[in-house]
Amino acid sequence: MRYLFDRSEAIELECDAVIRRHPSLSDGAEVIRARAGETVPPLAPGHYLISETTAPGEERVRYLGVAGRGYTVMQLTVGSFTSDTFDAVVHANRVPVNYYVNLGQVNDSTFRGYEQDYGDAVYPHLMPNSLSPVDPAFACHDANWDSLDAETIETRLRALDGFWRERGFAPLHGIATYTPSNSLVAAMKRLGWRVLHSVVPEQNWSDGRWAINHWGMPNQPFYVSGEDFRKPAERGENNVIAMSMNSYHLYMPHVTHWGDNVLSPSHFLRWHRTVESGPEPLRFGNFLRDYLAAAEGREEPFFLIAGFEFGRTFGVRSMTKHNRRGLELVLEAAKRHPVVFATGRDVALYYERHQLAQPEAVFTQRDYLAGTRIMDKPVNSGPSIGMEMHAYKAVFAHLEPLPFYHYDYLEPWHYRADDTAVPRDYVESDRAAVEVRRSGDVLTLRAAKPLERAVPVAVWDGEIAGDRPGRVFQPPQLDDGRTHTVLELPVGWHGECVLAVRNVSEPPAAEFAGSDHPAWRVQRIGGHCYLYLDFPATRPFEIDWQAPAACRIDAPDRVLGGFAAGESVRLAFNARRLWYRFHGLAPEAIRPGGDAMRKLSSEQRESERFFAEARRDLPRDRRELDEWFAAQLPAGEHVELELDCFGDNVFGERSRARPFDRIVRRGKAALRAEELSDGGISLGHGRSFWVHPRSLHFEIAGLETLASADGRFTLTLFTRTPKEEAKPFRYRLRIQHLGKPVAEFPAWVCPYDCSEGAVLQVRLPLDAFPDGVADCHLAADQRGVLDDWYREDGFIAALERLAVTCR
């Protein structure tokens, strides 16, 4: 039976049943009793429990959701291979969950019990190299489904289904994976599996050897096109419906090229990128509140997914606390807002009944990481408008009239799964085709030629009056009180159009212009305010500030506490301490004093000086370090590769370090070194690193081309602990080939300067790497899952330089 229904839909019962309003999300009152085969009239939108008599003395109790106008259909997805199951929260409140499990987790009865007792959807989360527990013959090293043809995948998934049923689960109706392909989709269609879970619509980055570029996908569940697994299509005869683990921020991952802006509490506690403190996942709560607004005024539901992962085997344990509290916030929101819950299975069945395609949606999102500069993001990117339409997907940057990116769903898509430069973006085409000029209350649009595709135009803080040449959308208003409009110019439109615009709101001055000082910015969101600086702090400094009224202040690493009116507090800033959160104060109350403004001006000048000198002095800094490092390499060995990790980035942080790696020297061998983890960070003045929060994975490839007199080579690694860190970095190094250990080197302690201890040298036999590829793992010599990153002095895995030499 399906457990998600529309408000207009009668319910045909498979068993004798009693339907009650939900006891914790509603009042628990009985609604109807009926017999198997009878049809229950449509129910009012909301939360219900249905008790079905499946056999004499046996009862099945399930959550039943009925969606109505303006409703959000929410999936809750738990990545239980890295997180708690949160059984105490979700099952005590009788709401259904999607669980992602690995194959080692299904041998006991835990998840089988969740499926049978609560109706949860349990999905094996796997890549093609995860299937050896099903059959040792399926063992392989490539994690990407595109490495297998549809026939091979079908054979392996059939065997997986048998493995699954043998352990007491219902037949599979889908899987979860990060590396889908057209061949996987084709195999799933042959099997009649509907659900492809765990796609990542706004990610385009490497994660180990997983090839992930899912740009172009809608965030709501969508029918997967036979052309390309990223492209949505209309419902057909045999459908696969793709769904993400978390709903994404549509704009920010395309700015940062890093896909971690998701509706998940744990993702705001990302180790050295942590942007949350205290017991409440407040940034997640703001993201959730704005996303729920997207459903307002809609006839068909808006489909949303909140994800809960990390904190048990990966991450920091505080993620578990925030995930648990985040789930509670979702349940509290479901009592106040028009929200119903469903599993991936029930969403797919609902789609097959009601949705010809994914619902169209136009909505506003704000910067929920305001105050941070993660992956070179602006300190506050401002609101963005997202459009996920049947014909295209487009997103507008703050105050821009034409899209920041624009993907066309009507043209053919034939792209490789691992191509990082797709799909085609029509931003430049839009700018060439349409001229937009807004002056006061007049908007002028011009197109010299008929438009080849629809082009949306954003009217920020305004409404359009009179006749319009195309469809008009107004994203639901958020608690910033701003009203925006989007006009869609249709295919074939050309000429000139002059429209009257009524200005109805404006950007908050404190957030976008500053309070008293242009660098002192305050964002109000969700009942509290974030203070941050509009320049990167390049050295530690402090500002004394006096509370104008009673308030609470949170710092990035901890809650500072409550302060009385007139009480003084010292606000410390540095390269990692960039923001403060205020409770109980309006933006206009959070103002700098005269001394603070002078300090801000001084530090802003220092920031400008630092960047100017970092760029100017980079050739000298490189030359000095090149000479020092060359002197550390083994005497009598020739250099085949010397790499300055992320060395061509002057200052900042990016995913995928390879475009910024600097080759210092290269020999005759065709060697290549590449990070396979998280990207790179540069601190300026030649201090740059490959990084991962805990375990840096990088590879040395092409070793088979080395000409070595003794059949061995030396790998030299170099890292200094940045002076900003309280304690020296400590690492363990593991070197492997196809998962098998070759060598291990514990307890490398990295000093703060260029001294002997900053260099680690390892002699390795070439015959240990018959295919020429060495996998290197540099792991923090610290407890794997810390309780709190700041309190326990968590540190990243970082590598500055490497060299390969031989005799």
Image (spheres, grey):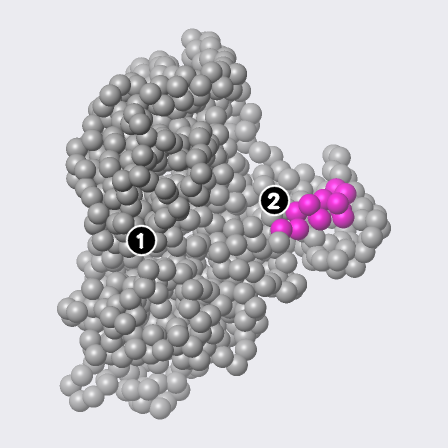
Disc 2: which residue: 404
**At which x and y percent is residue 43?**
41, 75
Of the two numbered discs 1 and 2 on the same chain, state the one appearing first in sequence: 2
Q: Within the magenta stretch, is there residue 627?
A: no
**At which x and y percent is residue 686?**
42, 22
Disc 1: which residue: 770
Q: Is residue 128 left or right of residue 256?
A: left
Q: Which residue does the image show at 67% across and 42% down from the upper left?
A: 401
The 10 Å Cα crowd at callout 1, few under 14, some 14 to 19, many 20 or more, is: few
Cα–Cα span, label 1 and label 2: 46 Å
Quarter of the picture containing the C terminus is top left
Q: Which residue does the image show at 44% across and 54% down from the upper left?
A: 212
Q: Is residue 678 visible?
A: no
Q: Give the range drawn in magenta.
A: 425-436
Q: Which amino acid does label 2 sit on?
A: Phe
Front position among marks 1 and 2? 1
Quarter of the picture containing the N terminus is bottom left
**At which x and y percent is residue 143?**
36, 59
The 10 Å Cα crowd at callout 2, few under 14, some 14 to 19, many 20 or more, is: many
Numbered mark located on residue 740 in the image: none
Q: Can residue 452 be seen in this view?
A: yes
Q: In this view, does 691 lie to the left or right of 70?
A: left
